[in-house]
Image (cartoon, grey):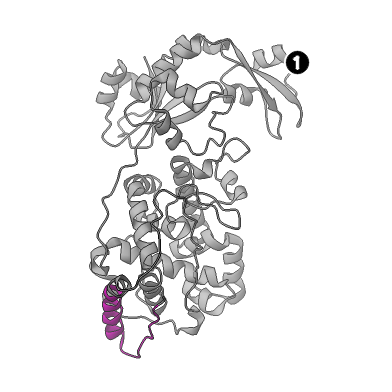
């Protein structure tokens, strides 16, 4: 059974009071209705369409409404109280109330991590709510158009943003790499448009569509373009829905939601130099296979790619796991990978990528010079070379800085000195920040 509410004509302050009462009334009414709904449990949840259904905003006069809509929360986006935002809030609090509760619950697991990354990248932390309207914070969400992951990257945009997408790896479903890519992409869009509202619209519609619309209609901002331009209905709703979700999420109790506990997502890193199944890696390093698999959903075959790759492991276990892996790898025979040359590849670049040397690549392929051509297959030796044997390479590892890390603590943990870490990484007197990668010699 679906309840439909007509919105009476009233002044802005009265409409806001009506909306607030309505948001409290819906769950009470819904509890009185017998349904056969089943809890989703751990089943996969489809990504929500950003626009979804709802009222056609062009049928609503765009004008300011009561500032009380914003409540007492503090925002770092220029959130407006207007009739379009109010309409989207009514839609979320009535037609999609249970869905919104699920979004906030799932999102809370990633909240601390996402906001920290956004702060590091100079992006408003309120854009944490963008992933709620994109995917509902389902890391493996896939849309009908082919967008994937928490941030719903399309294949072309993901590759342009530095994410690997192929038959073996899809980093769009890696919360760590995709969140960093989303932050940098949003910052790039802001650099183009000089405005976070237009950047958000471009995230949905593409920067070309927004730029052409601004020029064609001589629009001065998103609201002007949305009212006078030819934006798709989904894009027209996109920013108002983000603002509505942000207002709700910043003060959930005001709308009858119990605030979820925030945080929980944490990880450490482990570098592997050859292809290995995740369950074999877990056994070799003493890690929980289920947790390693859970932290690496982007490894589509449950196997690391050839040529070296950073794997996420449970927080606090990276150092010991790295040592165990090095000891395990030292007992394995030398391995070769196969690489098909792509445009722009060079022997020196491939040597860095696969942690070997240009000389060894030339040697095993019978090359006399450095010229390689697109489409050419190359055998890539792994292990050995100027980097030394695996046990020697273990003296230099990469550490992903976690909240609370200090140079002093890392020096003590890895058996080195603060001065050595600072010199190796060119830190000087600058502080280290979570998400930063440090090379640490032992």
The percent position of residue 414, horizontal first and vertical second, equals: 32, 18
Would residue 62 be seen by someone viewing this image from the given angle?
Answer: yes
Task: Say if 186 sits above or below 12 in the image.
Answer: above
The percent position of residue 432, horizontal first and vertical second, equals: 32, 34
Is residue 24 in the magenta section?
Answer: yes
Of residue 138 and residue 356, the one placed in the foreground of this image is: 138
Quadrant in which the N terminus appears: bottom left
Residue at 31% over, 46% down: 112
Number of residue marks: 1
The percent position of residue 208, horizontal first and vertical second, equals: 61, 62
Q: Residue furthest bottom?
A: 9
Is residue 342 in the magenta section?
Answer: no
Q: Magenta span covers which residues?
A: 3-25
Of residue 122 and residue 103, the one placed in the foreground of this image is: 103
The percent position of residue 90, horizontal first and vertical second, equals: 37, 75
Of residue 224 and residue 117, the one placed in the foreground of this image is: 117
Residue at 43% over, 24% down: 282
Residue 64: image quadrant is bottom left
Task: Say if 399 sits above or below 145 in the image.
Answer: above
Label 1 Cα neighbours within 10 Å, binned few <14 / some 14-19 / many ≥20: few
Would residue 393 be seen by someone viewing this image from the given angle?
Answer: no
Quickly name the residue at label 1.
367
Residue at 34% over, 47% down: 109
Q: Main secondary structure of the magenta part?
A: helix
Residue at 50% over, 73% down: 220
Of residue 105 and residue 175, the one placed in the foreground of this image is: 105
Quadrant in which the C terminus appears: top left
Task: Say if 95 sits above or below 341 in the image.
Answer: below
Task: Say if 269 sits above or below 181 in the image.
Answer: above
Circle 1 sits in a helix, a strand or a loop, which is it?
A: loop
């Amino acid at each position: 059974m679906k309840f439909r509410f007509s919105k009476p004509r009233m002044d802005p302050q009265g409409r806001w009071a009506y909306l607030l009462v309505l948001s409290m009334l819906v769950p009470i009414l819904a509890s009185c209705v017998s349904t056969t709904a089943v809890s989703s449990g751990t089943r996969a949840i489809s990504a929500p369409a950003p626009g979804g259904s709802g009222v056609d905003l062009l049928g609503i006069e765009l004008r300011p409404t009561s500032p009380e809509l914003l409540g007492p929360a503090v925002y770092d986006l220029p959130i407006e109280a207007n009739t379009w935002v109010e309409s989207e809030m009514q839609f979320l609090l009535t037609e999609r109330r249970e869905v919104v509760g699920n979004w906030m619950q799932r999102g809370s697991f990633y909240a601390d991590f996402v906001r920290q990354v956004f702060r590091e990248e100079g992006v408003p932390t309120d854009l944490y709510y963008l992933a709620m309207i994109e995917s509902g914070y389902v890391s493996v969400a896939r849309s009908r158009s082919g967008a994937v992951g928490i941030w719903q990257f399309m294949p072309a945009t993901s590759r342009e943003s530095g994410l690997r997408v192929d038959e073996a790896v899809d980093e769009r479903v890696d919360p760590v790499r995709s969140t960093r890519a989303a932050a940098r992409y949003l910052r790039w869009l802001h650099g183009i448009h000089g405005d976070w509202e237009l950047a958000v619209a471009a995230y949905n519609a593409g920067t070309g569509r927004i730029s052409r619309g601004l020029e064609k209609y001589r629009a001065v901002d998103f609201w002007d373009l949305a009212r006078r331009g030819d934006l798709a209905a989904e894009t027209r709703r996109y920013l108002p829905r983000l603002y509505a979700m942000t207002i709700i999420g910043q003060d959930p109790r005001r709308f009858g939601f119990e605030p979820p506990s925030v945080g929980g997502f944490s990880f450490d890193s482990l570098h592997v130099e050859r292809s290995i199944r995740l369950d074999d890696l877990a056994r070799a390093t003493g890690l929980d296979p289920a947790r390693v698999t859970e932290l690496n959903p982007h490894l589509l075959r449950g196997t690391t790619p050839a040529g070296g790759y950073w794997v996420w492991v449970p927080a606090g276990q990276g150092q010991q796991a790295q040592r165990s892996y090095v000891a395990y790898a030292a007992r394995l025979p030398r391995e070769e990978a196969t690489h098909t040359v792509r445009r722009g590849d060079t022997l020196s670049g491939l040597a860095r990528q696969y942690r070997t040397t240009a000389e060894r690549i030339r040697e095993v392929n019978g090359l006399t010079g450095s010229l390689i051509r697109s489409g050419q297959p190359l055998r890539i030796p792994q292990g050995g070379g100027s980097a030394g044997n695996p046990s020697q390479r273990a003296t230099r590892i990469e550490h992903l800085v976690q909240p609370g890390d200090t140079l002093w603590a890392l020096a003590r943990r890895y058996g080195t000195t603060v001065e050595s870490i600072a010199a190796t990484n060119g830190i000087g007197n600058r502080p280290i920040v979570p998400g930063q990668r440090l090379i640490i010699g032992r």
